[in-house]
Image (cartoon, rainbow, N blue to C red):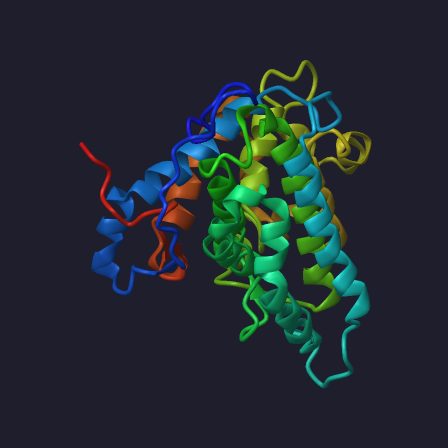
Amino acid sequence: FALCTGASPEDDRPPIPVNFMVPKKEISMVPDMGKWKRSQAYADYMGFILTLNEGVKGKKLTCEYPISETVEKLLSLLGTLDRWIDETPPVDQPSRFGNKAYRTWYAKLDQEAENLVSAVLPSDLSAAAPEIAVYLKEAVGNSTRIDYGTGHEAAFAAFLCCLCKVGALRVEDQLALIFKVFDRYLQVMRKLQKTYRMEPAGSQGVWGLDDFQFLPFIWGSSQLIDHPTLEPRHFVEEKVVNEYHQDYMFLECIKFINEMKTGPFAEHSNQLWNISAVPSWSKVNQGLIRMYKAECLEKFPVIQHFKFGSLLSIQSVKP
């Protein structure tokens, strides 16, 4: 949240680039990956993820934190997306996966995204809506392939990062961003995945961390750092998950996996099973951050879809 300038609401908002632009893809070949890693966008995105990681350290989902008007508006936006799922039931079709009703649901978002984002932004920032709305549309899966993966999740984090960069979200929104907004986003994504039987995008099968998400494992492990009783070895026990999932995002993720998959945990979620052997949550957290960079942010098939604009810029970081 070095990006969310202004320590108090009375402060003036950060200076904003006047020339908002509709973000576009810039990474079209593997050699372009160097451009991404040197970019302002990469530095801002990673800074955002790590600042939030620090902010939630040792805190429960149920702890006290302020909820600003922008956060309320974001929750209402996510509520709208949720309601549209109810209004768009899956259709009868021969194939079990990738229900085509998802395309109908997505078309509604595609059409309404700019209005939804304008409603979240203060009126003097409405010029930013077309740029920021692109990240929202990218954050819910792909309507051609009817799949969802960590690249879509990254687009949602980028969406929140942009709202910080324009000053719509502030430092004091940190906890609400993860514990309320991101948590609600996960609920809606899980509902999409279940309702329309979405395919995992670029899934590595049992060798990936999870079919769909990554960030809640990073932030969720940070929440558990220095927990008096829960250790990484405990999250494979169903009793522990059922007792504590309301407080910890990591355990919420495990609960969802347990509901969706059958058979021994070590077989369907091998990477997570290995993580349960790590002695401390801070080691888990550091390892997951390294893995996120290597498996998501440094993989061309993921980053080729990332879009760059004025807020998340492809320009190199100034030395």
- Percent position of residue 8, x then y: 54, 19
Seen at 69% across and 31% down, the residue is 248
Residue displayed at 62% across by 27% down? 175
The residue furthest left is: 319
In the picture as drawn, the residue positioned furthest to the front comes out as 124
In the rendered image, which quarter contains the C terminus? top left
Q: x, y (%) of residue 56?
A: 59, 25
Query: What is the residue that sits farthest to the bottom in this orientation?
Result: 94
Can residue 257 be seen here? The reply is no
Q: Is residue 166 visible?
A: yes
Q: Residue at x 28, y 50 (%)?
A: 314
38 w.r.t. 67: above or below: below
Q: As rendered, which of 195 and 291 lies closer to the eye?
A: 195
Residue 256 lies left or right of residue 70; in this view the side is: right
Which quadrant of the figure has residue 260? bottom right
Q: Is residue 286 above or below residue 107?
A: above
From the viewer's side, name the closer residue of 2 and 187.
2
Q: Residue at x 39, y 42 (%)?
A: 293
Residue 17 place in picture, x, y as percent: 36, 43
Image side of residue 229 versus residue 1, left or right: right
Image coordinates of residue 80 in percent, x first then y, are: 74, 56
For residue 102, what is the image quadrant?
Answer: bottom right
Q: Nearer the viewer, residue 153 or 165?
A: 165
Q: Count the numbered circles shown.
A: 0
